Every structure is written in structure tokens, then in C-alpha cells.
Image (cartoon, coloured by chain):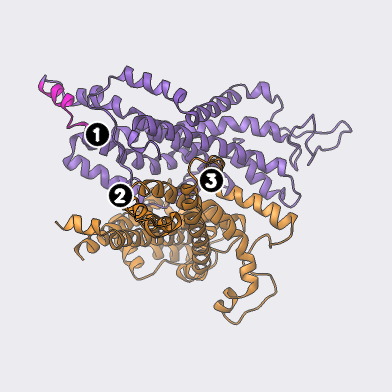
Chain colours: A orange, B purple
Amino acid sequence: MKLVLERFTHNALALLAVTTILFFMFRLMPGTPLAAFINENLNADQQQAMLEQFGLDRPMWQQYFIYLGNLVQGEFGLSFFQRRPVLDILLEVLPNSLILTLASLIIAYIFGVLAGAWLAWKRGSWIERVAVPAVLATRAAPEFWIGMVLLALLSFNAGWFPSGGASSPGLAYTNNWQRIASWDYLHHLALPVLTLALYLQGLPLLLMRSNMLEVMHEEFVTMARMKGFSEWRIVINHAARNALLPVVTAFALGVGLSMGGNVVIETVFSWPGIGRLLVQAVSVHDYPLAQGAFLMIALVLALMNFVADLLYMVLDPRVSHGRKG
Amino acid sequence: MAERAEPVLPVRTGWPLLAVLRRMAAMPLRDPFAFTGLLIYVLFVLVALFADQLAPTDPLEILFTKAGKLAANVPPSLDFPLGTTNLGRDIYAQLVHGTRSALAVGLSAAIIVAIVGTVVGLVAGYFGGMVDAVLMRIADMALSLPFLPFVIVLTGFLGASTSNIVLAVALLLWPNSARVIRSQVLTLRERAYVEAARVTGASSWRILFVHIAPNILPLSFVYAAIAIGWAIITEASVSFLGFGDSESVSWGYMLQDAFSSQALSRGQYAWFVPPGVCIILVVVAGFFISRGYEEVFMPRLRGR
């Protein structure tokens, strides 16, 4: 329990550091923070409203604590262009990003774990010599480029998938859940998920493969072999179980990490998620929205780092026991 | 994965700088993967050096056909090996000249990451205490920033220039190398030869830079090789999102140009496939080289 608290504090502090960096990043930019987005279209009242919204007339340290206090209350301010609370906009698109990320990760990890175990088993064969560099190439490719190639091949050329967005125009739904559960939504989701999964599968695959190779030489595997168990049973029951530990942790980390990387995938497929929102907000200098989107991504990252820490403790008792003593 | 593999150099006694350098230079000859990686690097460096000879056409020049019409979307031919863009620009020339910007971004980021990571790792590991605690907390902070969003926000607000992209990448990548090098220094500083140097009255800085630093050089090199690839991918992603340097023709610029001019729906594969393949080659070369050095200098990983 003490350890859980320690990891929680660690990750919470990291998040606090990120919000602090963000605060000063926006304020130490050349010119006043308002210079970036005030233009002639805003009248004096609106300018005054903005100044009050950020409390920019007060000293820096006061501004900082007002900012932190607002964040804790979920007060992210108003978007300049959409003229709505930032939090509403964020919560509207967050499900799209989470669905995209989780679906891709699950597919990538199921495939990666199975293929990785299989490749470890095929060690030294020509399959391994072809497959490992091929997997490395998918890890080395820019995510958005994989998306572009798949888009050209499967959407524009073959016509199997829509080329972007999350819903066909003209369709109406009574609520958001009905929209997400619809066939149309899944059809739009397929290509972004395929792209992201293709990019993500390399890590679990290579991790699983190297863990398997390591575990295969451990004593308990030799023991199982001496007991006369079949090779397949050894792989599944004995080796894979133990090789899986680091992969599970990597999965939790992957949720947080790929939320950041989604920025490009969502842009390629015009997927209405938080990454695309960030890109749009930064390019039109919608400062509160950009800050909110960035913090939301950082929050998911910190949360998932914490989950990974917990999983690591639960799955590998050596970690918690070793530290207690 | 830094917490998973803590590589340990096979040195009981320290190697002098020259011996380490000699071993590092000889490594690619022993490892076919590293050799391939090095070959790819050499190839791209040659292309970058002789870009003007290989592709004499200006990559941004708007070209016309012999009949005087705009040479837009010309399919690959002898005149235009990869065809032309929708504005009549030579794609092959852009690809060749893009090598320069890719290497400039990759190498400058790699050099900064290697220097900062090495110095921070050395100082934190050797002096320990408060210095170590402060430096490692800063590293934790940098690692908890979401990578691409941070680069976008920084370049979006500081201005879209290549140097800002390099700066952002370097800010986020140095902690990885600093952490691993620090843990390496922690074991090195307890070695007998370091103790011997201390007894003979060598100063801390002398021990650090003459006796310890040469032995972690291969590690710095590994992280530099990885940083080259990361920087190039990041530059491409940022350019693709529209925050790239509008002055330079990079592979990311080409991909963004192709995407926004509907090259995908026209099936102009010769426009957007080659830049991606070039990026993959450079990044994979980095993987291969770092793998080779890890296997030679950190043999605990060998044979996996």
C-alpha cells in the first residue's frame, strides 16, 4: 500500500510538473500571452474579458495558483473560436480517441504476442530472418505514412473504406452511444485502427520474442521438458506465461504513449479526436483549447503510467516484496 | 524499457580512449546488421553531399513541357524519374535534396542528445547526492511530457523552424541516454582502476573525463544513432501537420504536399512512397547500428 501511494505521488508530481511547464511555456513566449491570439476582430470588451479570464493583470505567482485552482475544478476556460467551454469540447472528442487507441492496442497486442511467441519458436529459420527486419521496418515508418499508403490502397483504390471522418454526412443519431455502436462508425474506424495497430504491433512482438527466448532457457522450462510435456504445452503453459509480464506493462504504457502519437493518425483520417483537436487549436492559436487538449493527453499519459506501475507490482511480486524488506 | 535492460560494459579495467575508438571502428566489420546500417548512412551522406550533381533541377522550380504547358502530375519518365507534383515540380529532385534536410535535422539532434545526455549522466552518476537527485527529477519531468504534442505546441508557438524542431526533440530525448549512462557510471566509479586513479591524486574531473567517459562512449553513440531516426520522424510528422519549416524541402514537406494536393486519390504512389521508404531506411539503419554496438559492448544482451 505504501508503495502504491509512492507511485501515485510520483506520477501526480510528474503531472504537476507538466502543467507547470505548460503554464510557463505559454507565458514566456515572446510578447504577452494575449498577443498570440488577439486580433482586430475582437472589441475592447472581449479583450477585457480575456484579460479577466486569465487574470493577466495580477503578478505571475498569483496567476499560477489561479491557473492550478481552475484546473483542479475542471475549469479549462473558453475556446476562442468555438466560444464554448474547453472541457465540453474535450469530453466530446475524448471517446473517439480512446476507442481508436484501445481498439488498435488490443489488436496489436493480441497479434504481437502470438506472432512474437511463434517467431521465438521459429528461431534460426528463414522466416525469422525475413520477419524481424520487416517488423523493424513497421516500427521505423512514420505512423502517418503507413496511414497514407493504406488510405491510397484500400480507400481510394479499392474503395473498401471511407477516406476520413467518423460518420457519413446526413446520418442522424439520437445519442452519442448509438452513433458509436453503429455500423457506419465502425466502418470509419477500421482503417485508422488498422494503421495504428500495424504501427504498434512491433513493440509487443519483439518484446514477446526476446522474453520467450530468455525464458526458454530458464530451469523451470527445462524441468517441464524433462517431465515429457509436449513442446506446444511448454510454450503456452510455462514459457509464455512468464514472458507475458513485461508485455502487459508495456500495454498500459502504450495507451498513454499512443494517445500522443494519435495526433498524426487522427489528422490523416480526419478522425475527430483529441490529437486532431490539438493540431487545429495550435494552428489557429486557440490558446485555451490547445492547453486543455495538451493537458488531457498528459493526464491520460500520467494515469496510464500509474496503472503500469500498479500492474507491474501485481504481476511481479518480487517488486513489492523486494522493496518492503 | 530502460528499467528492463541495464547493460553492463565488459570492462574490469578501464579502456583508454584510443582503444575504445579502435574497437568502435572495428565493430561494423564483425556484425552484418551494423555493417548494413553503416552502409545506409554512408549512402545517404553521399547523396546529401552530391545532391546538386545527382539532381541538377531546383526542387521548387516550376517546370513546363516542351509544348510550353505546365508539367503538372507528369507520370514517371526518363526526364522525371518519379514524375512531377501538381504544381509541376520535380519529385526526384525533392527526394534527393530532402536528404540534406533530413541529415541536418537528424545529426544536429543526435549531437545535442549525445552531449547533453552524456554530460548529465556522467555528472549525476559520479557526484551523486543532491546534484544527482535534481538532475534525475528534471529528467523525469521531461519524460512525462507527451512527445509529439509537446513538439507541436513548442513549434506552433515559438515559430515553425527546423531549429525549433531540433530543440524540442533534444529537450525530450536527452533523459533516456542520461539515465542509462548514469547507471553505467554508478558501476564504473566503484571499479578498482578508478579507485587507483583517485589514490594517485587525480582530480574528480580528470577521473570523470579521462578514466570513465571513454568507457561510456559506445553508449552515447547508441543513443545518438537512435536520436537520428527519432528526429527525422518527428520532423516529418511536424511538417506533415503543417508546423514545418516552409523554407526547406524535407521528406516530411513532400508527404504533406502530396497529402494536401490529393496525390492519394490520384494514386501517385511515386510521389508519396519514396520519401517514406527513405525515412524507414535511415531509422532502421540507426536500429541496426545501435543493436550492433549493444551486442559488442554489452554482451549480456548477446545471443538473443
Number of residues whose C-alpha sits closer than 10 Å to that of mark 2, classed few (under 14), some (14–19) or many (20 or more):
few
Give a yes or no on whether discs 2 and 1 share a subunit: no
Q: Residue at x 43, y 45 (%)?
A: A30
Q: Quadrant of the C terminus of chain B?
A: top left
Residues at circles 3 and 2 in contact by the CB criterion of under 8 Å:
no
Prevalent SS, magenta region: helix
Residues at circles 3 and 1 in contact by the CB criterion of under 8 Å:
no
Q: Which mark is residue A163?
A: none
Residue that label 1 marks: B185
Q: Which mark is residue A219?
A: 2
Q: Residue B196: within the magenta?
A: yes
Structural distance between the alpha carbons of marks 3 and 1: 33 Å
Q: Identity of the amino acid at label 1?
A: Val
Give a yes or no on whether discs 3 and 2 share a subunit: yes
Residue that label 3 marks: A135
Q: Position of residue B295 (x, y in %)?
A: 39, 33
Structural distance between the alpha carbons of marks 2 and 1: 32 Å
B128 relative to B209, above or below: below
Q: Earlier in the sequence, mark 3 or mark 2?
A: 3
Q: Residue B160: within the magenta?
A: no
In the shown orientation, is residue B246 left or right of residue B147?
A: right
Q: Nearer the viewer, residue A8 or A276?
A: A8
